[in-house]
Amino acid sequence: MSKYAELCAYGRRGATLKSIASLLGWDQETYMPRGGGDARAEQMALMAGMMHERGTSRELGDLISACEGESLNDQQSACVREFRRDYDKRTKLPQSLVEELARTGSKAQDAWKDARKNNDFKAFAPWLTKMVDLSRQKAEAYGFKPGGELYDALLDEYEPNATAKEVEGVFTPLGEKLSALVKELKDSGDAPSDGPITIHAPEDRQHALGLHVLRAIGFDLNAGRLDITTHPFCEGLAPGDTRLTTRYDGKYFPGALYGTMHEAGHGMYEQGLPKGGTHDGPGGEAIPSFGTPLADDISLGIHESQSRMWENMVGRSRPFWSWIYKEACDQFAELGKFDQEEVYRAVNIVRPSYIRVEADEGTYNLHVMLRFGIERAMIAGDLSIADLPGAWNERFKKLLGLDVPDDTNGCLQDVHWSFGLFGYFPTYTLGNLYAAQFWQTINKELPGLESDFAKGDFGRLKTWLNENIHAHGRRYSAGELCEKVTGKPLASQPLMDYLGGKLREVYKL
Amino acid sequence: MSKYAELCAYGRRGATLKSIASLLGWDQETYMPRGGGDARAEQMALMAGMMHERGTSRELGDLISACEGESLNDQQSACVREFRRDYDKRTKLPQSLVEELARTGSKAQDAWKDARKNNDFKAFAPWLTKMVDLSRQKAEAYGFKPGGELYDALLDEYEPNATAKEVEGVFTPLGEKLSALVKELKDSGDAPSDGPITIHAPEDRQHALGLHVLRAIGFDLNAGRLDITTHPFCEGLAPGDTRLTTRYDGKYFPGALYGTMHEAGHGMYEQGLPKGGTHDGPGGEAIPSFGTPLADDISLGIHESQSRMWENMVGRSRPFWSWIYKEACDQFAELGKFDQEEVYRAVNIVRPSYIRVEADEGTYNLHVMLRFGIERAMIAGDLSIADLPGAWNERFKKLLGLDVPDDTNGCLQDVHWSFGLFGYFPTYTLGNLYAAQFWQTINKELPGLESDFAKGDFGRLKTWLNENIHAHGRRYSAGELCEKVTGKPLASQPLMDYLGGKLREVYKL
């Protein structure tokens, strides 16, 4: 067996371990009885230990080095490059720091819960200080490219090869234009009514509608499922096994409908990755791709581009409602009181609010950009923890035009920082940016998509995504893939064109 | 840390691995999408490999040997004795034989499926010959006590320390008396009508009734669940996490009701084992019992005694129906056409039939005894495979009074032999025997149980089982426990007294 084949086999075994750990996680959120919690923690710790041991072993390092000396084609080289990337990341962090991050993060998360509940930022501040400090240590251990900054090292965990400066270059113009657009919509005298989206919608009917949509858009339910959890997620558990979850609010059906489409977008990426396939080894032999970077997702940003495209570009479009309106009325009797256009307008309402996870398509990215600016400054040491609430409220007012009433509705609302997720937030907006830029290209390359959608036919879009995005695994970085697919580096204009075009029309501007 | 504590910690890690493998199995039967099958096989194989490696390691052997040289109390000695037993069993089989059994068993199972479908014993005969031969090799590798026989070594896997001769000593008188009883009931002119048990019973109502019964008898639903599968089972997954499954037949509610009570009996044994507790180490330190034989079940026979007691002694009793009749009528409207006594009599109908898994309480053990006699003769080499159908049909006629119409309804009906489960069948009847003998003692020690049941109060019975059976783990063998609890070695009289007493009264004899 070639060293390359050995490396891939090693990766496959590790991916199988990871898939088992994923099932433990999925089961914990879905069906595990309450009493199983302690045992589940033991099981997870055991799996994490085994995965860490394998993922940082001398054996793996030697295999990668051996492959780096072999003569490989472009695809194989990319595969080895990404194996190297992951291995170096894992081995660069001292074990003591990994443990300290886990231990302190766990306590800080508890402290955050109390602080948010009691609107008591001061109680959380010392914990946040510790987590920022530990995250800086982590960033220093990772290192970053010349001319960059500490924050890059953290961002790189979630969006490989991206830098804060590049992100800033796209975010800044986006922020300005978005703020202006939101203000313009707010001042419009013709806002849609939320009547259609506050009707009574029984949970079982919502579930039936969700499954109907999943089948139509092409999520394979023979290789996946849909369950109910408190916090919706998608788990690409294993080849042929991708699990989505959602939750139902009987008085707000768009929550579950778009949540399900969002997770299905993630799920169709997972199902589209070549996990079940093979690629050529150095001797021309077929090597299973599962467990290699060739069957893995590129970045959180690209993953999010898939979920946001199905949720927003498809699900909040007029042709989608031409198709689903009748079925939705069959499921929710009260919806028939409103015509199709009223429903379409209602699911596109833009209304600035305090909480990111409840934000609409128009304001969502402003919430993300706020966090990006603040966490970047905290990691750089340019913003002291004590000044966080003030900085948050000031920027919030500037971006969204609202006075933040308290820290619970302000800088304490998200869990991320409490366990050290710095560099994660920007991937949400990167996802929207990638989605819009892909979307522009897709509509050029696939004319007449809208009339497909109006008939409930989403096949051409899914095939395009399978072939142009999913099939490559991690062969290209997110930036490379964007240029390869759209011919241009990532920019803010496609997202602004898409949002401005749709929302101005919805608001009759 | 003492060697004893080290040994227990080693066992705990192994038990955690096993609990993860159990979740993989549970999920495969309940919620896994069809497409996940291949990946699941990989996951299971990986877990099995790791468990085998740990369970047969030199490290484990050395730890056990070291403990055998230490000064331990009775409980600790029993713990080490059982660690030794398991280790020796695992290490006695050559790896090549283990693999051959798995490989041939898998193919033989496929062959059996076809053979049963086509009523073609001859097509299965060569596979059965191979499996008997491999099982004999396995028995030889295990070895057996002086004066015993090859079959003992196989029986010992499922019912430790039991011998064929002992089993025969109890089965022979039981078989004679049972055959006579079944004939007596058959000749009675006053058989109950099956009207009450062939009513329409919607599946969701059956599910509600099942949960109601689970709560009442004391299965802890905060530390367990009830799901639906093709083949019902109980999985004592981990401390605090015991999962039952059942299936619903809308035209035969006793199937799910008694199936659920049966699995709950297994489940309450699993919940009653001291998996969450500790015991004293050699230095008086508290050692978690999970993963040691002190928190493990004794044998399949004892496990089955728990399921059969709740299913039959409790669930098919008159006081149980005094309590549940009203609730059952509330769930199943048609049941109200029959009075309580008619329902009680109907769930106790005895009617000889061909298929073991559908057999009633009166004839079930005759099916098991038939298989015990035949498999014992096959392993001893006293019955050639070619003669199996003839021997089956002849004995069936003698025990149950019916002419077997074909091998599909005869010797091809059970899957067990196709993958080498020889020595497993007798544990079903041993379970009934243990249950009846415990039952006799329980009713002496807890007077007035019946009036508790009639009020829906099953607490005293559950507590008695927790304290007298579950709490000991594997400290005592099944035979020792039986003598300790009932004062007598296992005998057939208690089961005959119980069955004869109840069934003659039901049949008004």
Image: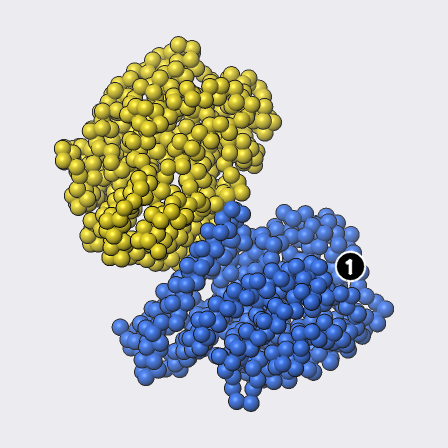
Chain colours: A blue, B yellow
Q: Is B354 above or below relative to A116? A: above
**Residue lying furthest bottom:** A147
**Residue lying furthest front:** B283
> Which residue lies under the disc numbered 1?
A194
Q: Is A292 above or below relative to B95? A: below
Q: Which residue lies at the image location 42% right of the left edge and 60% below the top edge?
A: A47
Q: Where is the N terminus of chain B found, in terms of image quarters?
A: bottom left
* Side of B166 relative to A105 (left or right): left
* Side of A154 relative to A95 (left or right): right
Q: Amino acid at mark 1?
A: Asp
Q: Where is the C terminus of chain B found, in terms of image quarters?
A: top left
Q: Quadrant of residue A108?
A: bottom right
* Side of A131 relative to A292 (left or right): right
Q: Quadrant of residue B482?
A: top left
Residue A69 visible (yes or no): yes
Q: Secondary structure at mark 1?
A: loop
Find residue B442 and report its horizontal and vertical position in percent: 41, 23
Viewer-closest of A115 and B417: A115
Q: Which residue lies at the image location 28% right of the left edge and 75% below the top edge?
A: A2
* Side of A108 relative to A285 (left or right): right
Residue A309 visible (yes or no): no
Find residue A228 and report its horizontal and vertical position in percent: 58, 52
Find residue B453 and report its horizontal and vertical position in percent: 51, 23
Q: Which residue lies at the image location 32% right of the left edge and 31% below the top edge?
A: B481
Find residue A281 and report its horizontal and vertical position in percent: 33, 75
**Residue lying furthest right:** A189
Q: Is B210 above or below relative to B21? A: above
Q: Is A191 above or below relative to B307? A: below
Viewer-closest of B172 and A296: B172
